[in-house]
Image (spheres, coloured by chain):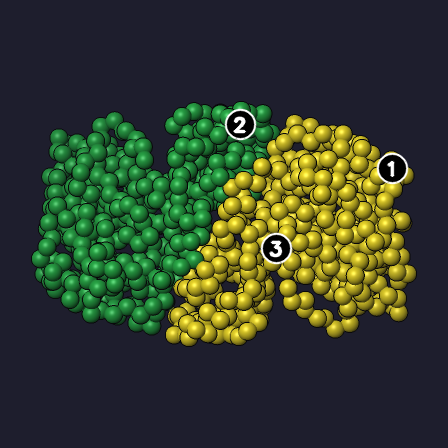
Chain colours: A yellow, B green
Amino acid sequence: MTMEQFEGYTYAEGGVCAAKGFVANGLNCGINPDKEKNDLGLIYSESPCAAAAVYTQNKVKGAPIIVTQRHLEKSKNTARAVIVNSKNANTCNADGIPVAETVSELTAKELGIRAEEVIVASTGVIGQPLSVEPFRRGIPELVRGMSADAHTEAAKAIMTTDTVKKEVAVCFEMQGKTCYLGGMAKGSGMIHPNMATTLNFITTDVAISADLLKEALSDIVKITYNCLSIDGDTSTNDMVSVMANGLAGNREIQAGDEDYQCFRQALYIVMVNLTKMLAADGEGATKMLECTCSGAADQETAITVAKSVVGSDLLKCMLFGEDANCGRILCAIGYADADFDINKVNVELASPCGRIAVCQNGAILPFSEEEAAKILAEDEIYILIDLQSGEYSVRAWGCDLTYDYVKINGDYRS
Amino acid sequence: MTMEQFEGYTYAEGGVCAAKGFVANGLNCGINPDKEKNDLGLIYSESPCAAAAVYTQNKVKGAPIIVTQRHLEKSKNTARAVIVNSKNANTCNADGIPVAETVSELTAKELGIRAEEVIVASTGVIGQPLSVEPFRRGIPELVRGMSADAHTEAAKAIMTTDTVKKEVAVCFEMQGKTCYLGGMAKGSGMIHPNMATTLNFITTDVAISADLLKEALSDIVKITYNCLSIDGDTSTNDMVSVMANGLAGNREIQAGDEDYQCFRQALYIVMVNLTKMLAADGEGATKMLECTCSGAADQETAITVAKSVVGSDLLKCMLFGEDANCGRILCAIGYADADFDINKVNVELASPCGRIAVCQNGAILPFSEEEAAKILAEDEIYILIDLQSGEYSVRAWGCDLTYDYVKINGDYRS
């Protein structure tokens, strides 16, 4: 995946432990019968953090979502730790909430913090009972093994059908202090975030008020994770959390000033890269799709059009087949639930190896099939839409629809 | 496919020619290079018809849609003929409208009627030029060969990736007169109708005013075609037209009385069966899915929930894999954009061989995997949702998502 460069920010190693004062760990505690695979992850900050989270808008909410919401309310948006398991979503079962509470308490006890300082999350199969026994056995060892080097073990613990771990961190200067912000995410199916996304955990050593942290997260989730669709299915357990422990030593950001913009940009860089990683590792995907809708009269229109295109099954199959059936792009633009003039729409098809115009003012142009085939043979495809009706521009991300998506989801439970 | 029985109505042979006074034909005129496949179809009524049509809500509208709208306006909702081609959608190209006008004129001239009495339609690849030459050559022969027996040739002419032709007709009594209503439809991809559907042509010998015909069509399309999704893609060329020539001899239906209800029911029976045929023959499908949402506070809620379930890619893969991963049903109910209490939702899974409860009051129940596997092995699957919040009930239809859907749409153009 191509990592975009942003002036004043450099990519760093360390994932969720790039920021000062954060440690992590991951291991197999027996929820996943495959002992080679981590199923339990932990992130811990040595000092208290301002915390913000956004959650799935699905009416079915996983028990951990409900418990985390309660914790952050009780702790007045502070947190010290994240505990997360994979292989079982702890959702739509009979006693999910007591289980999530017990997991939080076990974690808190071992770390010497309060249960309401724990963010708890789960991912995996929906509607199955989850025993607390594996947690009881695993958490002490998990805590004993915590270190700043073990961030990758934590990132592995949230993988389900993911084929690669997803970590990004960025380094930047603020008030002469070196600051870090890093995150980890899981994909890779049931992904069509609505006001939140899959499991994404972000840490930073910047000092910032909880209110501003929430504001930045809500703004940026709208143009990153919420512009991602793997399969149109909004999960029940989506969550993005950010923890800021202030150890970088900057004066706490309390208003929408230059420092806030600097922090916001760091958050954007990490979240947009995680989003693209999720798209590239969509279940069964062989290609990442980035669709840019520019020239829109407002942001909402640009989002709606770009998401309509990345969500089209027909278009996704066409990408997989590397067939430049560009009428399907127009079709998906046309059924977007937004107000614009279809007769002004221009479309270009691009990839790292080239770029061609395929539609002008709503009509398909003649184009070189050879050139189109070359573009579609790449594994990052860009669709560039210009509505020619305004100044707003938004990107959305997705992937192709493949035999493997069908295979993976025909027998996910087994 | 199971044909439901309705008291007072019997299924009849004859498709669009079941009603008195209608003839039809179909042939290959050279748009489809495979000479074995019909690509041009015609339906003709020996006497003038009241006509009504609904069209795609996609902003990209095929040229034939625009021309047909103009014709029905000019003719004050009367029509005599339908001319339809497959293999080229005549959409998003440079001169689609003049081509559709010329095709109408050629048809009208050969039949001795006016061009505005012609309903013109196209289906196939979007964004390619369409020559009128094949029509010029084919229409005279098409008209010469018209007969009441050739309805199947017409039904074949609108097949694209369809594997079976789709015709239904029904016979019923009104005012002591025997009446017929029949239709034909095409599938089988880019199907997620919005206020209209794929190409569907319905004929009847009932005498009814154009206004009431339009009212009945609009009501019924909402609970039949518009509750169908094969792949979430709303086509650019969707159209349903109904032509009523009055040859059954009944007094013209002019008000919402008992006769209107009788006619409306006939229209429902034909449209619901065509809808189910489209679902069963969805691109690559091995199973038809019917989802009933009952206990809803209003019709809109029931439609939204049922359509959300049949539209879930994950659920569709699960059906293909015959894996009772029922959390996915709950997940899709939960992200439906409607207002209801998720904690009151009950779900049953059924097929012709059995029925089991899988969810009660929003929580997954323990169920026999053996029984579930037996149910999912059938090729008609029913998901029965009860919101326990009201009296409204609606059905929606879809199919599984398979390797073949991906294959078909990876190389549709070639």
Q: What is the three-letter code of the residue carrying label 3?
A: Asp
- State the CA–CA distance, disc 1 to disc 2: 39 Å
| Local SS, label 1 | helix
Earlier sequence position, callout 1 versus callout 3? 1
Identified at 34% across, 40% down, the residue is B276
- State the CA–CA distance, disc 1 to disc 3: 34 Å
Q: Which residue is mark 2?
A: B369
Chain bearing tag 1 is A
B47 and A272: which is toward the camera: A272
Mark 2 neighbour density, 10 Å: few (under 14) some (14–19) many (20 or more): few
Mark 1 neighbour density, 10 Å: few (under 14) some (14–19) many (20 or more): some
A151 and B61: which is toward the camera: A151
State left or right for residue A305 relative to residue B218: right
Identified at 49% across, 28% down, the residue is B372
| Local SS, label 3 | loop
Q: What is the three-letter code of the residue carrying label 2?
A: Glu
- State the CA–CA distance, disc 2 to disc 3: 31 Å
Chain bearing tag 3 is A
Q: Position of residue A297 (x, y in %)?
A: 54, 67
